[in-house]
Image (cartoon, grey):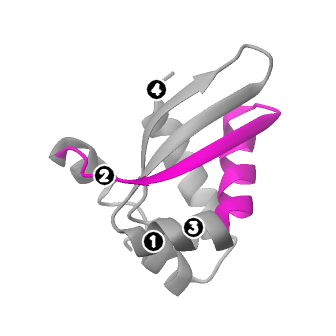
Amino acid sequence: MDLLPIWHQALAEIEMQMTRATFQTWVIGLVPEGVECDGEGCCRMVVNCPSAYVMDWCANRLDVVIRRTVAGVMGVDALEIEYVVQQYSKEITDELGTIGQG
């Protein structure tokens, strides 16, 4: 499953569900690392966060919006998201860098 097109679409939808400041502060720096699905409509996704503070904020305050939106774009019944703090490749960061700007 190619995550970047799914993530781009989900981010566009998430951006419409919150203020620009909230989106720019908490969501724009998130990068999907991977997803595993069980074949029965349930998936688990790992999302990289730029800091522990962002990870905590997303997991505790924005998870429902993020999870519901990404699950809808993926077309799955249930999605669990694990937010982690890790560095990610420059290629992924560059490709996602234009989202939400403009």
Residue 86 disc label: 2
Front of the two marks 1 and 4: 1
**Label 4: which residue?**
2
Coordinates of residue 38 in the picture (x, y in percent): 70, 17
Side (left or right) of 18 relative to 47: right
- What is the three-letter code of the residue carrying label 1? Val
Q: Secondary structure at mark 2?
A: loop
Q: Secondary structure at mark 3?
A: helix
Q: Secondary structure at mark 4?
A: loop
Q: Earlier in the sequence, mark 2 or mark 1?
A: 1
Q: Are marks 4 and 3 in contact (CB under 8 Å)?
A: no
Coordinates of residue 36 in the picture (x, y in percent): 57, 24
**Label 1: which residue?**
54
Front of the two marks 4 and 3: 3
Q: Are marks 1 and 4 in contact (CB under 8 Å)?
A: no
**Label 3: which residue?**
58
Q: Secondary structure at mark 1?
A: helix
- What is the three-letter code of the residue carrying label 3? Cys
Q: Residue at x 61, y 46 (%)?
A: 81
Q: Earlier in the sequence, mark 4 or mark 3?
A: 4
